Image (tube, rainbow, N blue to C red):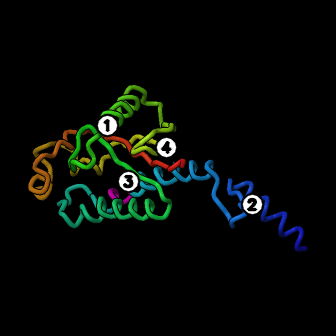
């Protein structure tokens, strides 16, 4: 009975991509890569579902609404970053928050996604700050609910106009490429 349980556990670990190390159990690089894809998908889906839940047609978008959508996503990103020991980056060519302005390298990734609408992800290896990372990148597209804050420049909520005087994240249409999300997994 014990032998069958041990064999079952070994096959579960092998199937899930988890390896058992002498020190007690490390997660394989392949599993970390799969987690990066799952993390990006979770963040994109979370933003989408929260926007649909809290942003309804003809509803005034307030700072509280903004916090329930974008603030909740930011909090989840920070939780994943800490728990998974990864870096998560949102980048766009038309930023609202200067922290999300695309670097030249990210601008090239955005151009790649823009040039090929069938491209759903990009997996590569990058070097940043002297360290090597596996990078998983997905495009972020504008949905109808997003237009309450990212539609016409003149229709933006008052608090956004006041809080983000350098805002460039407007005049989108549903389906437009908004930017990218990248999850960086340390390789060393």
- Residue 11 left/right relative to 98: right
Front-most of residues 119 and 105: 105
Give neighbour class at mark 2: few <14, some 14-19, many 20+ (Cα, 10 Å).
Answer: few
What is the number of the mark on residue 132?
Answer: 4
Query: Which residue in the protein does label 3 denote?
Result: 48
Instruction: Select label 3 or label 4 by which is in front.
Output: 4
CA–CA distance between discs 3 and 4? 31 Å
Please say whether residue 51 is one of the residues in the magenta stretch: yes
Measure the C-alpha gap from mark 2 to mark 4.
Answer: 30 Å
The residue positioned 69% from the left and 67% from the top of the image is: 24
Q: Secondary structure at mark 3?
A: helix
Separation of marks 2 and 3 at Cα, in angstroms: 32 Å
Q: Which residue is mark 2?
A: 12
For marks 2 and 4 on the same chain, the one whose residue lies earlier in the sequence? 2
> Considering the numbered disc 2 on the image, is that residue within a helix, a strand or a loop?
helix
Which-is-in-front pick, marks 1 and 2?
2
The magenta segment is: 47-52
* Dot 3 alpha-carbon crowd within 10 angstroms: few under 14, some 14 to 19, many 20 or more: many
């Amino acid at each position: 009975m014990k032998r069958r349980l041990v064999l079952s556990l070994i096959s579960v670990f092998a199937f899930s991509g988890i390896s058992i190390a002498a020190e007690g159990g490390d997660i394989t690089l392949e599993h970390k890569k799969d987690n990066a894809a799952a993390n990006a998908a979770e963040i994109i889906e979370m933003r989408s579902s929260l926007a649909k839940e809290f942003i309804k047609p003809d509803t005034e978008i307030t700072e509280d609404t903004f916090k329930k959508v974008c603030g909740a996503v930011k909090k989840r990103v920070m939780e994943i970053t800490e728990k998974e020991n990864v870096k998560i980056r949102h980048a766009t060519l038309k930023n609202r928050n200067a922290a999300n302005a695309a670097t030249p390298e990210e601008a090239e990734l955005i151009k790649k996604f823009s040039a090929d609408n069938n491209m759903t992800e990009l997996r590569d290896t990058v070097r940043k700050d002297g360290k090597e990372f596996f990078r998983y990148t997905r495009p972020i597209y504008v949905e109808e609910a997003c237009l309450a804050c990212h539609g016409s420049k003149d229709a933006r909520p008052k608090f956004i106009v006041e809080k983000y005087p350098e805002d460039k994240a407007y005049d989108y249409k549903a389906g437009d490429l908004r930017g990218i999300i990248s999850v960086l997994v340390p390789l060393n």
